[in-house]
């Protein structure tokens, strides 16, 4: 029997944040609810938002949960963990907890990285981010990545889903890739 990942196309609203905040690269409207479902976590489960920016200001009630945490390099976003994720996730202060799921939304290009405080000198590679995140989730846990590319599947994981994410005309299509850590 051959394995095929879940595939779909999500046509979503442009990014919005609570309290009228503006942030380049915020999650598209309607994304987090769908992303959580494919990660297999409810609104009350813990979800780590890597390169999380202002994810806590996501305006829809089933998106950012009360047990969610963020990790970012920009102190002005007031992340739960202020750290460089390029140094690895599994061996950091977060390793006390095997996460049920991790959602990664890094800058997609060097030009995008320039729009954030850390800039292009600290640009994280998507393949390494996914591999590190897979090692930071518990067995059976899932990792999602929103990016322009579909990264390679880590050796200890299974490719679960590949979703095209569209937010209107004349915008680039992003891909939401989901991987599950093998038992």
Image: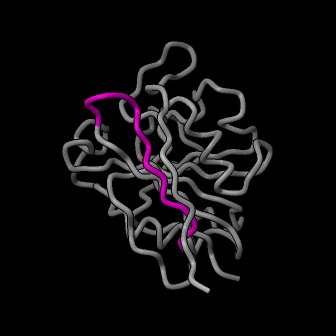
Query: From this viewpoint, is residue 96 visible?
Result: no
Most distant residue in the front direction = 1
Q: Is 137 on the left or on the right of 5, as rendered?
A: right
- Identified at 56% across, 14% down, the residue is 19
Position in image of residue 135 (x %, y %): 57, 75
**Residue 104 sits above or below residue 60 on the image:** below
**Residue 27 sits above or below residue 18 on the image:** below
Q: What span is in magenta?
A: 159-171
Figure quadrant of residue 15: top left
Q: Identify the image quadrant of the C terminus.
A: bottom right
Q: Nearer the viewer, residue 10 or 63?
A: 10
Position in image of residue 112 (x %, y %): 25, 42
Q: Identify the image quadrant of the N terminus.
A: bottom right
Position in image of residue 93 (x %, y %): 60, 63
Position in image of residue 149 (x %, y %): 33, 59
Query: From this viewpoint, is residue 167 visible?
Result: yes
- Identified at 60% across, 47% down, the residue is 35
Q: Is 102 on the left or on the right of 149, as rendered?
A: right
**Residue 158 sits above or below residue 14 on the image:** below
Q: Nearer the viewer, residue 126 or 54?
A: 126
Provide the major secondary structure of the magenta segment: strand
Specify whether residue 166 is painted magenta. Answer: yes
């Amino acid at each position: 029997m051959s394995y095929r990942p879940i595939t779909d196309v999500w046509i979503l609203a442009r990014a919005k944040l609570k309290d009228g905040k503006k942030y380049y690269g915020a999650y598209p409207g309607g994304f987090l609810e769908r992303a959580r479902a494919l990660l297999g976590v409810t609104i009350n489960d813990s979800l780590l938002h890597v390169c999380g920016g202002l994810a806590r200001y996501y305006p829809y009630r089933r998106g950012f949960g009360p047990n969610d945490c963020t990790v970012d390099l920009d102190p002005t976003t007031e992340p739960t963990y202020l750290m460089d994720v390029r140094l690895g996730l599994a061996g950091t202060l977060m390793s006390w907890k095997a996460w049920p799921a991790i959602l990664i939304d890094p800058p997609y290009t060097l030009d995008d990285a320039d729009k954030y405080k850390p800039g292009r000198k600290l640009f994280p590679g998507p393949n390494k981010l996914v591999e590190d995140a897979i090692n930071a989730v518990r067995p059976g846990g899932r990792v999602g990545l929103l990016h322009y590319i579909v990264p390679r599947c880590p050796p200890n994981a299974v490719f679960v889903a590949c979703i095209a994410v569209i937010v209107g005309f004349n915008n680039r299509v992003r891909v939401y890739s989901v991987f599950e850590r093998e038992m």
